[in-house]
Every structure is written in structure tokens, then in C-alpha cells.
Image (tube, rainbow, N blue to C red):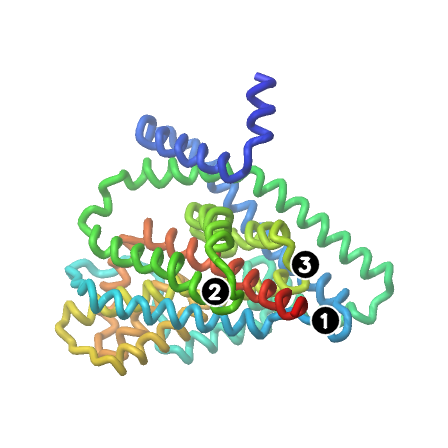
Amino acid sequence: MKRVCNVWIRTSLIKKIGIGVVVGLILGLLVPNFTGLSLLGKLFVGGLKAIAPLLVFALVSQAISHQKKGQETNMKLIIALYLFGTFAAALVAVLTTYLFPLSLVLNTPAKTEFSPPQGVGEVFQTLLLKLVDNPINALATANYIGVLFWALVFGFALKAASKETKHLIKTAAEVTSQIVVWIINLAPIGIMSLVFSAISENGIGVLSDYAFLILVLVGTMVFVALVVNPLIAFLVMRQNPYPLVFKCLRESGVTAFFTRSSAANIPVNMQLCKNLGLSKETYSVSIPLGATINMGGAAITINVLTLAAVNTFGIPVDFLTALLLSLIAAVSACGASGVAGGSLLLIPVACSLFGISNDLAMQVVGVGFIVGVIQDSCETALNSSTDVLFTAIAEKAFWKQEKA
């Protein structure tokens, strides 16, 4: 037993997670009624979600308070990459639907308690109002735009604080980071439980009726992850991007796939950035910001399902309209975190561009919820892993400029 424990301790976290996936799959098929196992996954995701707002606030305020005058953070380039990457993903989704036309059977009304926003303006109004949310409420509700805003305010205010106070803030950030490490080390058990829940509750064949739609959605996201993002990374770094791309997908994308929560994956991403040797002053801001505005996966979901509805109703779409749709999808996706229900509830905004009524658009949302078991997992994996990728390539580009 001691030898087994020693081998397990020496095994890398990714291999442990792989073992957890396999065990969860087997248990889900063999003992689907063992529902008590699902609790472990809920505890794991709950722990990550609970610590993430505190981690963001502690690290950002600490990083800003200790920032030296004139210090570079590469945030302009990172934000530009976030926005361009989201638009590029939306455009790829349009091209995919031209190559593989989709149609939907819309005979089931959407069963959702949410109501969609009335337009892009409402999406961003909600997002901006979250900036000035009560800081305690922002921490309690995981409102990351509000958490980031107040962390920046506190950070700038702490610049004038004494060395003892700054040291206390730094200690708080280090303690929070250590708690994150403890929780992340429980990932194999948590992910095993999440896989078990997915298999035992839904079965393997539950999504067979929507196989082609899922294939187009997932295929587009894979193409963006393995072709579009590496191309952007190569243009910025001027070196082979795939080792970094695969590392981000393996160490960030895998956990995001199973937790299906960008918020829960913020601690994982920050730990990965630390392991990559990136600047804390940069990633402590860029990672939570990316969880809010870097939404390539969401843009793909919005465009694919919207154009599937357009094709179902026989509405012609010219290239300029498709380009406008990509822009709307990208802008809307950046505000997805400010809307209850995420990317799916932004589909009616895009459908309105083609005159599709809200009732019909909500039926499309209903289809989205059905395929959400796979769609949401892949979408979160793409979004979250790209946060780390774009943060890393921006810093690596800066390193090359310094050496030059």
C-alpha cells in the first residue's frame, strides 16, 4: 500500500486526471445508481468557485500595489488578442456552416426560466453596471468584472500604504494561492466524479439525434484550438506554437472541459501561468479578464446555432451579413458572462438580425440546452485554455523584444 501511495504521489497531475476520467467512465457504466459519488464532483467545483474570487482579488490588489512605475504588463496586446481571437472564431463558425449546412427540428419550446437580452446594448449595460457592484456582493456572487474593478481600485490605493501593510497583502495572496494548490491536487477525484455524473445521468447515446450539430460545433472549436489559435500565436511569437498550445489544452482545457466553468478554472489557469514562469502582474489581471471577454467558444456557439436556424427557415445570407453576424457574435460573446445562461441566451440577439422572432429563437436556445452536455464542455475548454495561451504568447513576444 505504501508503494502504491508513493507511485501515486510521483505521478503527474495530468496522468492522475486521465486515470480519474477512465475510472469515472467505468463506474458510470457499471454502477450508475451509485449517486453518492456525484457529491465529490460538486464539492470540487464548489471549492474552486469559492476560492476563485478571493484569489483574483488578492493577487490583483497585491500585484498593483507592488507594481513599479513604468513596469510593462503587456495588457494592451493581450486584450487585442482576446478581441481578435473571439472575432476570428466567430468568422470560422460562419465559414463552417457554409461548408456543412445545418437545419433544426424546432417543435419543442425552450424550457428555461431565463429571458434573453433584448440587444447587444442591454448585454453591455448589464456588464458595465457590474463594474460598480458592491465589492462584498461581487465576491459573494463571483462577479469577476466587479471583483477586478475593485481589486484594481484597492491596489492603486495600497500603493501609498506602508511596507508592513503591503507585506500583509502579499502574505494573504500567498496563503490564498496555497489553498488553490491544495484544491487543484484534488482534481483527479473531482473529475472522476464529474465524469461519473455525466455518464450515469445522460448515458452515452442520449445525444445521437443531434450528432451532426454536435460534430459541427465541436469540429469548429477543435479547428480554432489547433489551427487558428496556433496561427495567431506563431504570428506574435515567430516560433513553433504547438508545444505551448498543447500544454495549455492539456493542463487548462482538460479541467475546464469537466468543470464546465470558466470561473472554476481561473485558479487552474493562474497556477499554470505561474508554472510557465509568466509575470504575476500580468496574469493576475489577464486571466480573470479573459474569463469575461475572451469568448471564442461562445462566439462559435452563437453563430453555428443562429445560422442553423437561418438555414431551417430558408433565409438567404450574403457575405456582408455573415460578416456583420460575426461582429455581433464576437461583441455579444464578450458580454456573455454578464447574462444569466451564458452564450446560449445570446442566440436571440443574433437571430434578430435576420428577423427571426423571439419565440422561434428560444426554440433554438432549447436545442442548445439539449446539446449543452458536450457543447458547453468544449466551449469552456477552448475559452479557458486560450486565456493562458494568449497571456503566454504576449509575454514571450515581449521577452523576444527585450533580447533584441
Rendered location of residue 196, percent (x, y): 38, 35
Q: Of marks 2 and 3, which one's residue comes earlier in the chain?
A: 3
Question: Going 41% across and 30% down the picture, which residue do you hit?
Answer: 23
Residue 234 shows which numbered tag?
2
Q: Name which residue type carries label 3.
A: Leu
Q: Is residue 23 above or below residue 91?
A: above
Of the two numbered discs 2 and 3 in the rendering, the one whose residue sits closer to the viewer: 2
Q: Name which residue type carries label 1.
A: Gln
Q: Name which residue type carries label 2.
A: Phe
Q: Farthest bottom residue? A: 320
Q: Farthest front residue? A: 404
Task: Give the distance between the C-alpha atoms of the residues marked 3 and 1, in whole angstroms.
Answer: 17 Å
* Crowd rating for badge 1 (residues with CA inside 10 Å; few <14, some 14–19, many 20+): few
208 sits to left or right of 222: left
Callout 3: SS: helix
Q: Of marks 2 and 1, which one's residue comes earlier in the chain?
A: 1
Rendered location of residue 340, percent (x, y): 42, 63
Q: Nearer the viewer, residue 114 or 144?
A: 144
Residue underneath mark 3: 59
Q: Of marks 3 and 1, which one's residue comes earlier in the chain?
A: 3
Callout 1: SS: loop
Quarter of the image where the N terminus is located = top right
Residue 404 appears anywhere in the view: yes
Residue 71 shows which numbered tag?
1
Question: Going 73% across and 61% down the picture, which residue do you hit?
Answer: 62
Of the two numbered discs 3 and 1 in the rendering, the one whose residue sits closer to the viewer: 1
Callout 2: SS: helix
| Count of numbered tags | 3
